[in-house]
């Protein structure tokens, strides 16, 4: 029996990440189930747009906007396409009779629809409507997208994200009085985090980009790291006593409404106690007072109190970390994610 063939098209090249995963030096979290679909009878591979591979002479911005145009023709040898791209590829796919069908993974389209002008909003809505399915990160994101677009519910299924729980497994060394914050999305709330940790008796490491912390006063106990190897990231999770995901409010117009999902799953996979800002997507992945603590938006006092509570209460820290690890093992492995995607891919390919 022939297997369903699926092409994954990522926003950026994943060649290096795939090579690192094969070498055991990177997780396959950001490959979105690519490596786990074979056990569900699906042959999946990463494919890069021809304009990225063959037209390096074109300015990056031009390639970025044009590369989706020929994709349905480039991918005519597969049964379905899975991609976070949605500017043009679903619309262009209609010119080929919607073959191959294109399933779009929604990392942040809700935020774009909320902040965009009328023309941009109409174009994106039309593109998403032309996709075979728009797959959401969580129920909260799905509900908002349905409200924003009026799509039929069956057009917008949910496939919860996963994490490479083997790569991020907890270590054996004792935890340090270390707080970590991981994330480069613009929806991260570093101003509130810095106010919260100033004066806290702990080292704080933030893995962020310069744009995240520009013009902010960085407390003396905070160290900023930019791009670090995955092994170093895993070491930080294993050493830390608290992982913090500080987020802007749900209505914040920049970044993604799915901001923080990967960091929350990585922390839970590592058995690291988690403190996160309240946002709808957070409650899709974190159970309050079980696998983590949830604090109000832009409230440095509440955030500081939660961080100190975990730092100073070893029993609470152990309970939160163990519950987070257990939750990942039960529902958020990469195999779990692939298992949720597989029937959606099969259905689209068969239709």
Image (cartoon, helix red, strand yellow):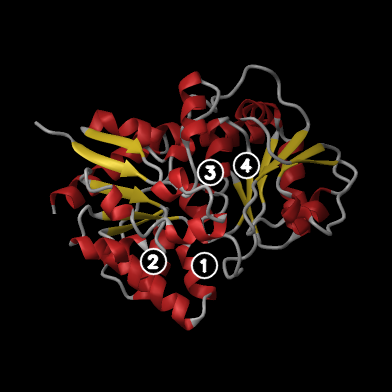
Q: Residue 262 carries which label?
A: 3
- In terms of sequence position, does the residue under pointer 2 or pointer 3 come before the other? 2
Cα distance in 3D space between marks 4 and 1 = 25 Å
Q: How far apart are marks 2 and 3 (CA)?
A: 21 Å
Asked whether the beta carbons under mark 2 and mark 4 sit within 8 Å of each other, the answer is: no
- Quadrant in which the C terminus is drawn: bottom left
**Image quadrant containing the N terminus:** top left
Q: In this view, does 191 lie above or below 224?
A: below
Q: Which residue is drawn at 66% across and 62% down?
A: 297
Question: Given the current orientation, which residue lies at the most extreme top position?
Answer: 172
Q: Which residue is drawn at 51% across and 60% down?
A: 62
Mark 3 or mark 1, earlier in chain: 1
Q: Which of marks 2 and 3 is in front?
A: 3
The mark nearer the N terminus, 2 or 1, is: 1
Q: Which residue is drawn at 68% across and 30% down?
A: 236
Q: What element carries label 1?
A: helix
Depicted 103 relative to depicted 203: above or below? below
Q: In this rendering, which labeled residue sits more in front, label 4 or label 3?
A: 3
| Relative depth, front residue between 129 and 136 | 129
Which quadrant of the view contains residue 220?
top right
Q: Residue at x 30, y 44 (%)?
A: 341
- Residue 69 at what x, y percent from top left? 36, 60
Residue wearing tag 4? 274
In the structure shown, which secondary structural element does the residue marked by tag 4 occupy? strand
User: Does residue 158 show up?
Assistant: yes
Image location of residue 182, percent across then percent down: 66, 43
Q: Look at discs 2 and 4 and give the one toward the viewer.
A: 2
Residue for badge 1? 111
């Amino acid at each position: 029996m022939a297997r369903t063939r699926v092409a994954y098209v990522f926003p950026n090249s994943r060649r290096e990440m795939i090579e690192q995963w094969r070498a055991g030096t990177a997780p396959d979290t950001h490959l979105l189930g690519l490596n786990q679909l074979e056990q569900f009878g699906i042959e999946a591979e990463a494919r890069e747009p021809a304009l990225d591979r063959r037209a390096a002479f074109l300015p990056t911005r031009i390639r970025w906007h044009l590369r989706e145009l020929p994709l349905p023709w480039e991918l005519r040898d597969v049964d379905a396409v899975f991609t976070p791209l949605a500017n043009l590829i679903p619309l262009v796919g209609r010119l080929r009779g919607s073959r191959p069908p294109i399933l779009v993974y929604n990392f942040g389209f809700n935020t774009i629809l909320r902040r965009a002008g009328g023309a941009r909003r109409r174009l994106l809505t039309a593109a998403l409507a032309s996709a075979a399915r728009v797959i959401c990160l969580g129920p909260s994101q799905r509900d908002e997208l349905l409200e924003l677009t009026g799509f039929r519910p069956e057009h917008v299924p949910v496939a919860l994200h996963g994490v490479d729980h083997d790569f991020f497994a907890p270590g054996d060394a004792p935890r340090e009085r270390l707080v970590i914050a991981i994330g480069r999305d613009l929806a991260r709330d570093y101003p509130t985090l810095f106010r919260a940790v100033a004066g806290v008796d702990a080292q704080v490491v933030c893995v962020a980009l310069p744009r995240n912390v520009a013009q902010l006063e960085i407390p003396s106990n905070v160290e900023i790291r930019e791009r670090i190897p995955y092994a170093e990231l895993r070491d930080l999770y294993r050493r830390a006593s608290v992982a913090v995901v500080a987020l802007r409010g749900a209505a914040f117009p920049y970044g993604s409404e799915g901001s923080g999902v990967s960091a929350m799953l990585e922390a839970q996979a590592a058995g690291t106690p988690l403190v996160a800002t309240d946002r709808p997507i957070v409650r899709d992945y974190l159970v309050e007072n079980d696998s983590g603590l949830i604090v109000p938006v832009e409230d440095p006092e509440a955030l500081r109190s939660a961080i100190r509570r975990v730092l100073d209460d070893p029993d609470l820290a152990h309970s939160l970390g163990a519950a987070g690890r257990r939750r990942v093992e039960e529902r958020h492995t990469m195999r779990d994610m692939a298992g949720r995607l597989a029937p959606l891919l099969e259905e689209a390919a068969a239709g």
